[in-house]
Amino acid sequence: MTMFETPPELADGPLRILVCGYPGKSVCHGGLGWSSVVLLRAAGRVALVDAGNFGMRKLLIEQLGRQGLKPSDVTDLLLTHSHYDHSVNWTLFRGARIVVGAVELAWALDEPWGETPVPELYVRTLSDWPTCETVQDGAEVFPAMTAHIAPGHTPGCLIYHLRTPERDVIFTGDAAKNRAELISRDTDMTYDPAVSKATIEMIWSRWRERPGTVVVPGHDLPMILDDDKPRYLGKRAASIRAWFGKDMASQSEIDLTAIEQGA
């Protein structure tokens, strides 16, 4: 199974999708945690939007290598929120400027240990890290890119809005995890459905401002609007290899895209 490739519609811009999130949850083994990680370049700087989970560490290093980069070349890490599947690999980019919402970090530090998706010790260390920068709503966090508070999934979630000559790009993190949440305005994992719905309406308002704007959710393919309907960009790649046989050479590959239904 090949990795997700940045779609042609985005090839002329500064964005490369290193890991494309998946809109699913494990039924029997807790969370799945396959979240999007995106690379941006501008004005001699290299940024990542989110950092992925532990299982992505080798993959991130490999994907950066395909772009001619090492983790130490990343100058800015922009976290959408504090949950482990988006933030825990900040230590891989510890030399970078690490941006997190001020509201989000304060909330995460007060979360009970061992009970939530917040990686407690990593968040505590991040709060004292010399390159950590907490930001407020409306802050410019990267050239032509602003942060906006988007509560619901967590109280201090941020979305990031990038404006380029070619198109706008909105990174929603888990404020809108997938296409189903964007269309239905209903959400999974929210502390208040009404707050999440208001945030999704805000995302829709920004999405409609400029034709051709791309939305990159926290756990789904990038999307563009056609006649006010979200259309996926690129082709999903997601599979699992399993050892069901009697030797290590016998592997079964389960294609998670084979059962995907069209919109």
Image: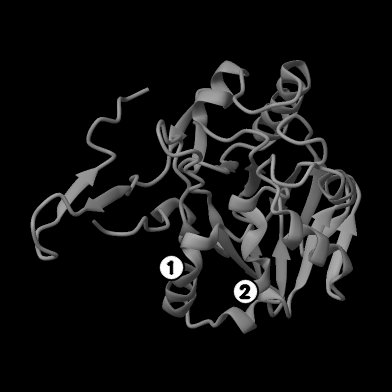
Q: Quadrant of residue 79?
A: bottom right
- The amino acid pointed to by label 2 is Leu
* Residue pictured at 21% horizontal, 44% vertical: 254
Q: CA distance from mark 1 to mark 2?
A: 12 Å
Q: Is residue 16 visible?
A: no
At 71% from the left and 18% from the top, the residue drawn is 193
Residue 59's label in the rendered image is 1
Q: Is residue 203 left or right of residue 180?
A: right
Q: Position of residue 109 (x, y in %)?
A: 85, 50
Please state if 261 lies on the left or on the right of 208 as rendered.
Answer: left
Q: Is residue 226 above or below residue 219?
A: above
For label 2, the residue is 92
Q: Residue at x 64, y 60 (%)?
A: 88
Q: Position of residue 213 (x, y in %)?
A: 60, 41
| Residue 133: quadrant of the picture | bottom right
As helix, strand or loop, the secondary structure at mark 1 comes to helix
Question: Is 252 rendered above or below residue 228?
Answer: below
Q: From what the image shows, is residue 86 above or below residue 30? A: below
